[in-house]
Amino acid sequence: MEGAARKAARGLVRDFGEVEHLQVSVKGPADYVTEADRRAERTIRAELAKGRPDFGFLMEEDGESAGADPTQRWVIDPLDATTNFLHGIPHFCISIAYEREGEPLAGVVYDPLRDEMFWAEKGNGAYVNDRRLRVSARRRLADAVLATGIPFGARPGKDPFVAALRRVMDETAGVRRFGSAALDLAYVAAGRFDGFWETGLSPWDVAAGVVLVREAGGFVTDLAGGNEMIYGDSILAANPALHEPMRRLLGEAMDAATRG
């Protein structure tokens, strides 16, 4: 998984340099970035298939394809934070998870510009490069810095989200919106963020990050406190002390907004 991520990353870094130049063109870099995304995905798929030819795939660009072994597959986002990449913002990553019978058991999230390889395997801990990761030890929301993603365009759920964001802003030390759910989860695992929540994500956005947070000692659920954070509609990750206070705070705010 690490080898596949690093090989695809070489192309992404090269393409990112071209995107920065394309910012000044009339056409803009959108078509170029789409092809960069697909090239990275093809590279990752080819590399993983060499080592595990029987595994299936669930990928952002090419969708789902079954393998000879229906119980095991890779869940891949070849370029998380495509919008950042498109605008020349140096914050994006590759996310790869290994899943068996619907459960993610290992994952890597690779930030090629910082050369930070976040990786974890169930029962063996979480790491960035060679350093062991642990979630933060903060116990009060008032001291916490949280991360989230903001609904954009015509996506539903803006009003409940804004209501929740207002409550969180009032009761924490700050909220960050960096545009990459996979890196947000990796940063929770590293203790850089104390918690993260978002709605409307896809499995490839979060599968690797879920393993990272769990192996770093954190809790991950959906916003209702259940286990549908990968194939459901929401995710909440935090250190053990802050997970339940975050869940209550977000739930109360969203419920109040829904009631009007």
Image (cartoon, rainbow, N blue to C red):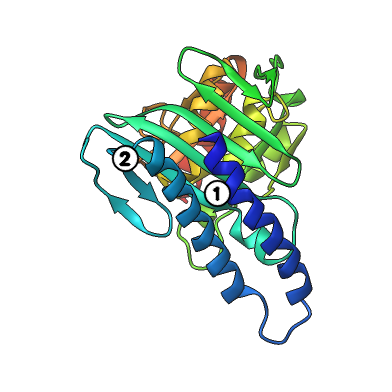
Residue 49 coordinates in the image, percent (x, y): 38, 43
Residue 147 coordinates in the image, percent (x, y): 66, 39
**Callout 2, which amino acid?**
Pro
Q: Which residue is mark 1?
A: 161
Compared across the picture, whether 65 is left or right of 244 comes to left
Secondary structure found at label 1: helix
Q: Is 186 or 123 nearer to us in this picture?
A: 123
At 34% from the left and 46% from the top, the residue drawn is: 57
Q: Is residue 109 visible?
A: yes
Secondary structure found at label 2: loop
Residue 186 coordinates in the image, percent (x, y): 62, 32
Q: In whole angstroms, how far apart are the C-alphas of marks 1 and 2?
A: 42 Å
Q: Which residue is mark 2?
A: 53
At 70% from the left and 14% from the top, the residue drawn is: 137
Which numbered circle lies on residue 239? Answer: none
Quarter location, residue 5:
top right
Q: Nearer the viewer, mark 1 or mark 2?
A: 2
Q: Is 207 or 120 nearer to us in this picture?
A: 120
Q: Is 5 or 133 nearer to us in this picture?
A: 5
